[in-house]
Amino acid sequence: MPPLEALVKNQNLVFLLEEKLDKRGGLVKKMIGYPGIRIEQFDLPHLRKYDDWIQKRAKLLGGAFSIPAAEALAKKLGRDDFEETKIQGKVIETKEVFSLWQTDAEIRKLLSLASGREVAPEDVENLVHAEVEVDSIAIANAIADNDREKALALVENFLRESAGADQKAGVIQLSALLSEQFRNLAIVQDLASRRMPEAEILEKTGWKPGRLFVMKKIASRFPAQKVWQTLAKLEALDTELKTSSTPPRVLLDLILSQLLLK
């Protein structure tokens, strides 16, 4: 990397930061001292402002999102999973779990799919969730097989692909998806134990036959007790992620180690 003197010579550099800058470090102090460098810090968009950001970003990229589509994408990427730090009941800091880098990538992907038309909520539902849902089903399947190596590899790939550097957002997303899959397994086991016909199960769940086939196949390899135990552990993981200072990946690995006991 060239020295700072070479970077700022004959040009003005602007650094945009999404998080607070620690000004105690030597390099940071040196950067701030150069007249050719300007550092601007901004807060991530909160709640509905995130929806607005998505629409504005899409427009800047030459496309368009409907209001419902922007809201659907914001929710999928963690708009409502923010953390608040309070002192005496007053919110002093709000920390978002989503990443604007990931958001930008999803927007570009959806605009490409739309091919010039306005992105609709159905596009978000079909494209954004489909990939990660397949991953979570594969992880649930590996847990059913008690295949530790495969499960950990799938988790590693999910975290790398879904949230990039924002590991906590990835762990929260994975926890939510796995909870959804194990709730589905519990539903399938309950309805099957009552000998409910497949046609009636499809009507009650709104699933397609292929999805029901996959859920039944995985459910048949899980004792009902383990499904409910797993749901309880995932609920505990969600609570710890929102209240504990322990690194998210450590919490996830602890849960996985309990689920994948030999």
Image (cartoon, grey):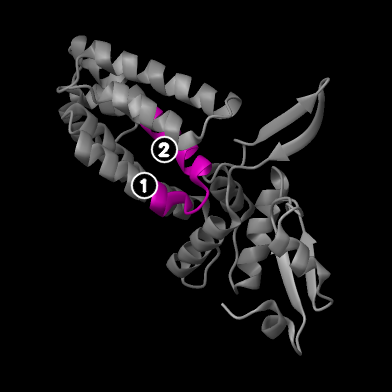
Q: Secondary structure at mark 2?
A: helix
Say which residue appears at 46% left-offset and 19% top-offset. Answer: 236
**Dividing the image into 4 quarters, which one contains the C terminus?**
top left
Residue nearest the observer in this picture, 22 or 158: 22
Residues 28 and 101: in front is 28
Q: Which residues are magenta?
A: 159-179
* Residue shown at the point (43%, 32%) measured from the top left: 250
x%, y% of residue 103? 55, 56
Amino acid residing under circle 2: Leu
- Main SS class of the magenta portion in the image: helix
Q: Which residue is denoted by mark 2 in the rendering?
A: 174
**Of residues 212 and 229, which is closer to you in this image?**
229
Q: Quadrant of residue 200?
A: top left
Q: Where on the picture, by quarter, is residue 195?
A: top left
Q: Which residue is mark 1?
A: 158
* Residue appearing at x 33%, y 42% in the figure: 155
